[in-house]
Amino acid sequence: MTIKQLSAIFTVLAAITLSGAGCLAEQFSQSIVPTEATTKRDVASTDGLETITPDADTASQVTADTPCNEGNRRFWGVGQNGEGFTFCYDVYGLLNGNTRVPIVTQWTGNKAVLYPQDNPDWQHTVTWFQIGNSDPAEEIRRRFMTEDNRAACEVVSNPGAMWNEYVIAGGDLEAQEKCGEFRYGFFIQKFEAPNVLYFVTTGQDTFMLTQSWLQTLEKVEGGAPNTDLSPTNSTSGGLAWHNDGEFGLAFSYPAMWGPLVVREELGCYQRIASFTGAGDQETVFLVEGSTEECEPAGRGGYFGDVTNTLKTWDDISAWCHAHDSCETFQNASGIQIAHAYTKSLDSWGNKLSDVDEYAFVVGNDRTAIVSNERLVQNGLGRQQDAMRVLVDTISLRPFGP
């Protein structure tokens, strides 16, 4: 790609963003002149640009109590596994250019949300994803773009003094609309933690300076969990957090689903999670399989029974590729997940459409599956965004309190 072509893309992105997605001046303008220290790093070419190759991964040594600069507060987004991220932000922002308003923060497992008080639609967000040693641009194409997105759009990189930055861009306004849900925002890969990508969005970015708080963004390993999310089924930002030890899993789910019921499924020693939906119908959405081969006694079959035949990642991969479409990705905790999609399904006499299933390995010879099949069957819809948030926030934990 030529510099002239890049310039055209940036111009298009600016027009798109200014018309409804927040000002691009902060989103993709990290035009910091590299310092002497920066230019000493190795560089690799990406689409005609020199992208700085990050150093070996290092986690932050800060704690939840490490002070920020005066007038700033520390955001501590660390889960039960001790992993996450932190940054400092100004406790006040400017509304309409001159009115000081408190900044509200929320955390939904792997996503921070910041907005001026009483204006929740003016959100800045940052979501973190572990990518291991994968190439960031390739990982973005694989995890955050569909086949149609990749046909119309490309990942464009922009190196800076503190991080490499990436956007998903089309060549014109029409193509930009085909770039998928991650087209409004940008990804950053900080040099000190290259195995993590942060996806950042800005709504009305006039209320606080994005660049200032992103400069303090750090990866955390072995940190104390955020106590706001420790209680079983605690609620944060429209999501609830399940972490009671009955599963070997912790995860976020929509608070509007209400309290979860976790129990052993009859006949197969499966652990299932469900909530009571419309008409007092039990809506099962997550099943953790047994290590035992079994037959469902005293009940009919259901989607969770597949976990008794899926024992390894190879089993999951073969199962996934037998569906209408299949994608694999790592969630924020680094768990490898296979997403199988079925356009039309005949499920034990029920005609269903738009069924999403996510399968992953929990432990030796044990797998789990998250599915919207019962949501669709019970008239609650596909709930694609809610399911993806749930899957992205799953982390493995020991059984017990």
Image (spheres, rainbow, N blue to C red):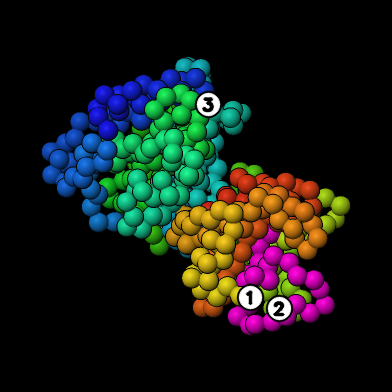
Circle nearer the N terminus (2, 1): 2
Q: Residue at x 45, y 49 (%)?
A: 143
Pick the residue in front: 81 or 346.
346
Q: Residue furthest right?
A: 279
Q: Is residue 286 magenta?
A: yes
Q: Residue at x 69, y 52 (%)?
A: 344
Residue at which label 2 appears: 268
Percent from the top left, x then y, of residue 232? 64, 60
Residue at which label 1 appears: 308
Q: Say if residue 261 shows up in the picture.
A: yes
Query: Which SS does the magenta portion mostly show?
Result: loop
Circle nearer the N terminus (1, 3): 3
For discs 1 and 3, the disc positioned in front in the rendered view: 1
**Distance between the Cα atoms at labels 1 and 3?**
53 Å
The local secondary structure at tag 1 comes to helix
Give the residue type at disc 1. Asn
Q: Which residues fall within the magenta stretch?
A: 285-307
Residue 301 placement: quadrant: bottom right
The local secondary structure at tag 2 comes to loop
Left or right of residue 55: residue 204: right
Residue at which label 3 appears: 101
Pick the residue in front: 185 or 122.
185
Badges 2 and 1: C-beta atoms under 8 Å apart?
yes
Percent from the top left, x then y, of residue 137? 35, 45
Point out the image quarter for the C terminus. bottom right
